[in-house]
Amino acid sequence: MSDGPVEVQYYYRTRWGCHDEFVELFLRNHWPILREQWAAGRYTNVELFTPRFHGEGGADWDVLVTITYRDWAAIQEHSDPSLVTRLYPDQAAFREEERRRFELLEAHWDVVLEARPLER
């Protein structure tokens, strides 16, 4: 395990017909949290991907979020709970929307990538 950046891919497969609602809730409730942690230096990059075309064949996912953590210690850090309270003063509404966001999923998995340098 290196001391450098660590990339993690977070895959989501939404229920049929729920893709847009999931992305909307993600952008409203989770992206601001990620953005704050990125600004604080925990992450060096965050990207959101969706397939360009419907029915990409064997793809098991329809939303992919890639986070590059500063280092392994940044992965082990826990988010400061006060961040969520500060960003979302109406905690009941936030919790309900987050519950709904995960209700829209059929599957979710995380893949921690380990770089394997190749000789040139």
Image (spheres, grey):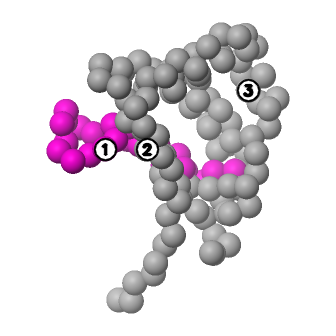
Q: Tell me the amino acid under the disc marked 1.
A: Asp
Q: Residue at x 68, y 36 (%)?
A: 36
List x then y, in percent, for residue 111. Answer: 49, 56
Q: Which mark is residue 84?
A: 3
| Tag 1 secondary structure | loop
| Tag 3 secondary structure | helix
List x then y, in percent, for residue 51. Answer: 27, 39
Which image quadrant for residue 63?
top left
Instruction: List the residue tagged with mark 2.
Output: 11
Neighbour tally class for label 3: few under 14, some 14-19, many 20 plus, Cα within 10 Å: some
The magenta segment is: 42-67
* N-terminal label among 2 and 1: 2
Which image quadrant for residue 80?
top right
107 w.r.t. 4: above or below:
above
Q: Tell me the amino acid under the disc marked 3.
A: Val
Assign the N terminus to one quadrant of the image. bottom right
Instruction: List the residue tagged with mark 1.
Output: 60
Distance from label 3 to label 2 (Cα)? 22 Å
- Decide: marks 2, 1 in contact (CB < 8 A)? yes
